[in-house]
Image: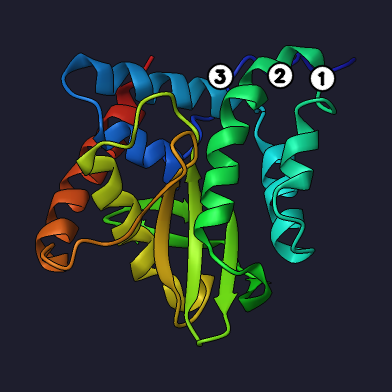
Amino acid sequence: MPEPASTAPAPTPLPYATLLAFTRYVDRTGPAKATFVGGLRKQRASRSGFNPHGQLVKALKADIAFRTGGRHLAEIAGLVKPRWRPLYETLVPGAVNYLHSLGDLSTVDLAQTRDAVGMVGDLPVKINPHLGLRYDDGRREAVRLHFDEQPPSPEALLATLHLMGRQMEQVLPGAEPVLVDIRRGMAHHRDPAARPDQVERWLAGEAAAFTATWSTAA
């Protein structure tokens, strides 16, 4: 006689965030924080999610690697699916501006980066730059791209650059973290006036609240 199917509820996924998700969380206030975490948990449980920006990142990397001055970026909007063309037509001009801001591309190479997981309190946060750069003068940069319509807020900038910087030995040793607002072609670097110990305490508090909300979200 077959055993009855189990009716036990599926286990709640453990709290976890990507760098993008965590910085979007710290940028919210009040009830919007709980709503955001609940949406993340449901997305995690259903294993849903899609990155529409992958082709743009590949085109930017190709223009850097092959010193093609924006040719791959100029072509990419016509190669993506029609539903994504308006998005790409909006993003490409800023991406080209950022590419030109790198200067003489013969002095810049792509550098291999690695993803890392950093613990912020008890919350694992995945640190995943979009690309790494190595300059002829020895400088290195680990770059994340910001695709949102609004520029990154001061809080999002502070959190992103701090969390990337604290895991840099795993991501790209010796590199500086950079957040590029791709729509405006603007690169942001760490504020030398920011005190890492204060930032760490702030983020630990945010992580504790994120974890508590995750555990109680419907």
Q: At numbered mark 2, what does the secondary structure look like: helix, strand or loop? A: helix
Residue picked out by circle 2: 84
Identify which amino acid the numbered label 3 is placed on.
Answer: Pro
Q: Looking at the figure, which quarter contains the N terminus? A: top right
What colouring style does the render use? rainbow
Q: Nearer the viewer, residue 205 or 169?
A: 169
Residue in view at x 55 percent, y 78 percent: 135
Q: Nearer the viewer, mark 3 or mark 2?
A: 2
Report how far apart the C-alphas of labels 3 and 2 lie in the structure.
Answer: 37 Å
Q: Which mark is residue 81?
A: 1
Report how far apart the C-alphas of labels 1 and 3 lie in the structure.
Answer: 38 Å
**Earlier residue among tags 1 and 3:** 3
Q: Would residue 116 be found to the left or right of residue 195 on screen?
A: right
Give the quadrant of residue 105.
Answer: bottom right
Q: Which mark is residue 9?
A: 3
Q: Nearer the viewer, residue 77 or 201?
A: 77
Identify which amino acid the numbered label 1 is placed on.
Answer: Lys
On the image, the x and y values in percent for residue 4 come to 76, 13
Residues at badges 1 and 2 in contact (C-beta under 8 Å)?
A: yes
Q: Residue 175, relative to residue 207: is it above or below?
A: below
Q: Would residue 80 be found to the left or right of residue 153 on screen?
A: right
Q: Residue 55, relative to residue 98: is it above or below?
A: above
Q: Which mark is residue 64?
A: none
Q: Looking at the figure, which quarter contains the C terminus? A: top left
Residue in view at x 47 percent, y 81 percent: 139
Identify which amino acid the numbered label 2 is placed on.
Answer: Trp
Q: At numbered mark 1, what does the secondary structure look like: helix, strand or loop? A: loop
Give the quadrant of residue 181.
Answer: top left
Residue in view at x 33 percent, y 16 percent: 35
Query: Is the residue marked by circle 3 packed among few (<14), some (14-19), or many (20+) residues within 10 Å?
Result: few
